[in-house]
Image: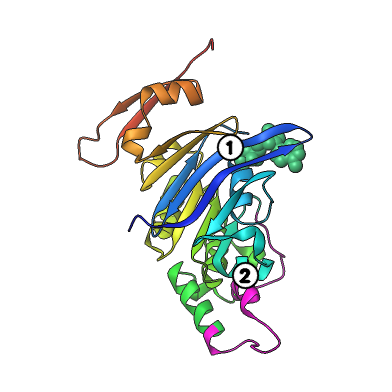
Amino acid sequence: MNHTAILDAHGIGWSVQGQPIVSNVDISVRHGETLGLIGPNGSGKSTLLRMLAGLLTPTYGEICFDGKPIQQMSRRQIARLITLVSQQAETEDRITVRDAVELGRTPWLTALSPWGADDEAAVNQALRAVDMEAMSTREWNTLSGGERQRVHIARAHAQSPQLLLLDEPTNHLDIHHQLAILDLVKTLPVTSVIALHDIHHALRCDRVMVLKAGKKVALGPPADILTSDLMRHVFSVDARIVPDPAGGASLISFQRIHSI
Ligand code: ADP
Ligand code: MG
């Protein structure tokens, strides 16, 4: 990882009917990093990701990809650079795994460059990356939750973006499959921003950004950011941060604060 920014958001915000949902957020996503985004329910994580993906225009502020404002780019140009796997990502029941992954190539297809060998290669590589090659002819509606999530990530990977945005990709998965998805994202050769609801998962990210009521309250390496004070202030829990005896990620025990 180097420290040059791939994506810069300068003081962005989004309001609806005068109500601020995301307020004045600055963020610089570094080449190659896995940046975790955490915050209570309703703190603005999905809204922020949709702005970073170019799907929602900020009410104010500017987002630049490699120094160029994305507001000035076409939908297709943005889709070649940035992909969002959204929280409620669904797909049609009747299509196969391979069909679903092929959809990722859409922004690269034009009248002058129809489906070709490079598209085929990108799809094969994406299926291999998520270990779904053997299931490529399976129908979507026969897949488990973890398999579906892997296909969503394969579709995003086949799109060959430089920045991958994931909105709570581990929802509804058991612990083994949650960790498998996070490990997969970390091994992909792409910069990623992941909204997460499990604090333990945030410990696995290179950096973490914390949102509370639409405002950025912290950004940095997880070990520096996820302090007891922050957990009390942002999540209203008493947290004990205990070093893992095996030297791995810290473990956190939680106690809900009753009166806040
Ligand atoms: P998170 O992903 O952190 O749970 P969201 O970004 O989904 O948070 O939502 C943040 C807040 O903005 C929530 O209170 C939600 O109800 C509100 N919100 C999001 N989109 C809209 C909208 N289109 N209209 C009104 N309120 C919205
Ligand atoms: Mg959300």
Quadrant where the image shows the C terminus? top right
**Residue 226 in view:** yes
**Residue 146 in view:** no
Q: Residues within 10 Å of mark 2 (few under 14, many from 20)?
A: few
Q: Is residue 31 above or below residue 122?
A: above
119 inside magenta stretch: no
Please provide percent x and percent y for residue 102.
61, 76
Residue on which the image places disc 1: 24
Q: How many marks?
A: 2
Task: Tell whether 205 sits left or right of 149.
Answer: left
Residue located at (50% from left, 52% from top)? 8
Task: Tell whether 180 sits left or right of 115.
Answer: left
Depth check, front residue: 194 or 56: 56
Boundaries of the magenta span:
89-118
Amino acid found under the numbered disc labelled 1: Asn
Residue on which the image places disc 2: 77
Please provide percent x and percent y for residue 234.
49, 25
